């Protein structure tokens, strides 16, 4: 099943980064997707298909969070 990625979206990956973080933010879209580790700030360019397999869950950007 294809996974759609969107700019600014936060991803939770199955495998933690060496820094211990599992949350990433999408910063570049294309055949390769650029993601940034939210824990250490590391930027990574990875093939879309590989990222699809590594993604456990993804959430829209924080801006759509409810405030009431
Ligand atoms: Zn990291």
Image (cartoon, rainbow, N blue to C red):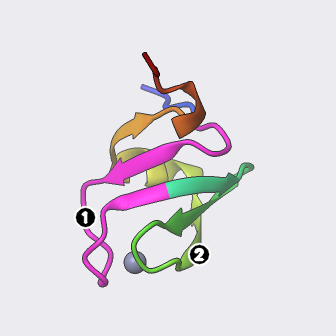
The furthest residue to the front: 68
Residue visible at 31% across and 83% down?
19
Residue 68 is situated, as x and y percent measured from the top left of the image, at 42, 16
What is the quadrant of the N terminus in the image? top left
Q: Which mark is residue 15?
A: 1
Marks 2 and 1, the one that precedes in the sequence? 1
Q: Is residue 48 above or below residue 22?
A: above
Q: Position of residue 51 (x, y in %)?
A: 46, 53
Q: Which residues are magenta?
A: 5-24
Q: Residue at x 37, y 58 (%)?
A: 23
Is residue 50 shown left or right of residue 4?
left
Label 2 sits on residue: 43
Does 17 appear above or below 60? below
- Residue 35 left/right relative to 65: right
**Marker disc for residue 2:** none
Q: In front: 56, or 19?
A: 19
- Is residue 14 a member of the stretch shown in magenta? yes
Q: Residue at x 64, y 37 (%)?
A: 6
Say which of 49 and 7 sits in front: 7
56 or 21, nearer to the observer: 21
Q: Is residue 4 above or below residue 50?
A: above
Q: CA distance from mark 2 to mark 1?
A: 16 Å
15 lies left or right of 29: left
**Majority secondary structure of the magenta segment?**
loop
């Amino acid at each position: 099943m294809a996974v759609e990625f969107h700019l600014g979206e936060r991803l939770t990956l199955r495998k933690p980064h060496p820094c211990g973080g599992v949350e990433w933010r999408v910063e570049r879209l294309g055949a390769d997707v650029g993601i940034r580790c939210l824990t250490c700030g590391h930027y990574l360019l990875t093939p879309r298909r590989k990222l699809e397999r590594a993604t456990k869950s993804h959430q829209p950007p924080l801006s759509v969070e409810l405030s009431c």
